[in-house]
Each structure stands twice: as structure tokens, then as C-alpha cells.
Image (cartoon, grey):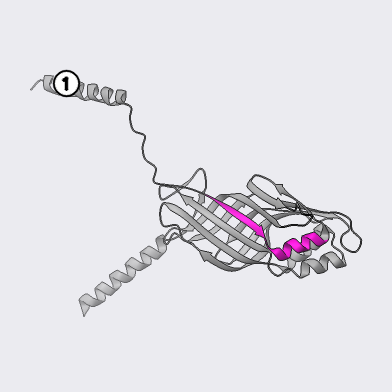
């Protein structure tokens, strides 16, 4: 019995030590590595069909903003068929014990400009950029730059995430894709959109019908482990000469 109690105590201490060592680590892509693996990624925000219809009502002009990897703004038919922006992941927060991705930050976004339209908008502008996705709380924060006196709002809670599917943990080299769907706007976010774009009754009503603002697709790439460079043949030759010199010196040492 005494031995069993000692084993239980030892096991509990081991588990406690493991829990104490587990902590979120922040990885800056492009400069940091995670467990020796170079890591990078992108996040793509795609607007929903309902949001595109609301943008059509307000005749909102959309353009890329900031340092985006790529963007799609398709309104060749006079109405929006697709709007998306792919941004570079700048940093990740990862649970050191499980590899679970806790949050991801990106750079760049989209700008929206509303023209004056009677009963729709008095005119205004809105920029949504530099997203920071909290996967644990299922929230999306952003930097919002709005017209009509809104100004710049940083770390602004803009959307809530309805569901998260796909890979949620980094376990080694490979490609990990996570889908964040059902982006619903917060009350503060809705009011900020309305003020920034100067929306009137028709414009505000169109925006209010949008329950799902779109999806975010996160792709994290983990390369193979870093390996030291292979020496040139001349380097091996110099090493050989050096070792030969050491051997001769040892042989000539007085006994």
C-alpha cells in the first residue's frame, strides 16, 4: 500500500510538472521557428453572398488595403459576385504542450467607400485590416479605420465565429488548414459600420439582414527541420590537413 501511494504521488507530481511547463508561445512568422521548424501561413477572408447583396444596395466600392498576398474583387457584371482578401500571417500563439493554435494575426485588409445615395448613405469610408483571430474564444478582432468621426479602432471585437473545422493543432512538418465559418457581427461592429459608411434607412436595413458575413480560411505551412549547410569539398580538405597537423604534433611530443 505504501508503495502504491508513493507511485500515485510520483505520477501526480509528473502530471503537475507537465502542466506547469505547458504555456502559450508566440511565433513570429518569417523570423521565428516552432520546435525547430520554419513556419508561415496565410488567412483568407471571403465575404458571404448576403453581404455582397448589401454592398450592392449601397453601391460600395471595395479595394485592397495594406500588404495583402492577393485579393479578389469581382463586380464585372455591375454587382458583386465575389470579394476576398488573402493576408500573410504575421504571428501565431501556440500551446507548447499540445501544438494547438490559440490565435493568429494577419496584416492587410479591405477598404470600402460609400457614395452619397438618397435614403441609402450620406457617404463614408471603412477599412478593416490586421485581423487577430482568437480561436479559443471564437472571436475576430481587427483594426478598423472609419470615416464620419469614427477614427482608428485597434483590437476591435468585430465578429464572432460560429464554427471552427479542420486542423487546429501543429504537430510537425506539413500543411494545416482551418475553416472559420459563420462570422456574425457584434453590436458595436454593426454600429461602427453604419456610422463609418454613413448608412441611412435603406443602407442600414440592408446591412441588418446580413446574419453571416463570410468565412476565414487559415493555412499554416510548417517546413522540415533546419539542417546545417553541407561543407564544400575544400572545407573537408582543410579539416583533413588540420587533423593531420594535430596528429603529427602529438607524435612529436616528448615522452
Q: Quadrant of residue 128?
A: bottom right
The residue at the far bottom in this view is 1
Is 254 or 66 nearer to us in this picture?
Answer: 66
Residue at the image point whose x is 67% and y is 64% from the top = 159
Residue 83 placement (x, y as % from top left): 69, 55
Q: Looking at the rendering, in which quadrant would you find the N terminus?
A: bottom left
Q: Is residue 239 above or below residue 44?
A: above
**What secondary structure is marked by label 1?**
helix
Q: Give percent across and percent down for residue 37.
A: 42, 48
Furthest-right residue in this view: 118
Q: Decide if residue 146 is on the left or right side of residue 87.
A: right
- The one nearer the camera, 138 or 155, is 138
For the record, the magenta segment spans 41-57
Q: Residue at x 66, y 49 (%)?
A: 71
Residue 253: where, in percent of width, then height?
12, 21
Residue at which label 1 appears: 249
Choose top left, top right, bottom left or bottom right for residue 210: bottom right
Q: Is residue 175 left or right of residue 236?
A: right
Inspect the magenta stretch and tell me whether residue 47 lies in it. yes
Of the pair 238 and 247, the residue shown nearer to us: 238
Is 163 a magenta residue? no
Residue 235 appears anywhere in the view: yes
Residue 152 appears anywhere in the view: no
Left/right of residue 126 with respect to residue 31 in the rendered view: right
At horizontal 80% and vertical 57% (from top left) the residue drawn is: 196
Which of 227 and 84 lies nearest the eye of the viewer? 84
Amino acid at each position: 500500500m505504501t508503495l502504491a501511494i508513493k507511485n500515485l504521488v510520483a505520477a501526480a507530481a509528473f502530471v503537475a510538472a507537465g502542466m506547469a511547463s505547458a504555456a502559450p508561445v508566440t511565433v513570429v512568422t518569417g523570423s521565428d521557428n516552432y520546435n525547430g521548424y520554419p513556419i508561415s501561413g496565410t488567412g483568407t477572408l471571403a465575404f458571404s453572398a448576403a453581404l455582397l447583396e448589401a454592398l450592392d444596395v449601397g453601391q460600395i466600392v471595395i479595394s485592397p488595403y495594406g500588404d495583402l498576398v492577393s485579393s479578389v474583387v469581382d463586380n464585372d457584371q455591375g454587382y458583386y459576385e465575389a470579394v476576398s482578401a488573402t493576408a500573410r500571417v504575421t504571428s501565431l500563439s501556440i500551446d507548447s504542450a499540445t501544438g494547438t493554435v490559440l490565435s493568429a494575426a494577419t496584416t492587410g485588409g479591405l477598404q470600402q467607400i460609400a457614395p452619397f445615395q438618397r435614403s441609402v448613405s450620406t457617404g463614408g469610408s471603412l477599412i478593416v485590416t490586421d485581423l487577430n483571430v482568437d480561436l479559443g474564444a471564437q472571436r475576430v478582432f481587427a483594426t478598423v479605420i472609419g470615416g464620419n468621426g469614427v477614427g482608428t479602432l485597434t483590437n476591435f471585437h468585430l465578429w464572432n465565429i460560429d464554427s471552427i473545422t479542420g486542423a487546429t493543432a501543429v504537430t510537425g512538418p506539413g500543411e494545416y488548414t482551418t475553416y472559420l465559418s459563420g462570422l456574425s457581427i457584434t453590436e458595436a461592429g454593426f454600429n461602427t459600420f453604419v456610422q463609418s459608411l454613413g448608412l441611412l434607412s435603406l443602407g442600414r436595413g440592408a446591412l441588418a439582414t446580413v446574419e453571416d458575413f463570410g468565412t476565414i480560411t487559415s493555412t499554416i505551412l510548417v517546413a522540415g527541420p533546419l539542417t546545417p549547410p553541407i561543407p564544400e569539398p575544400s572545407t573537408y580538405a582543410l579539416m583533413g590537413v588540420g587533423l593531420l597537423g594535430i596528429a603529427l604534433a602529438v607524435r612529436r611530443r616528448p615522452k
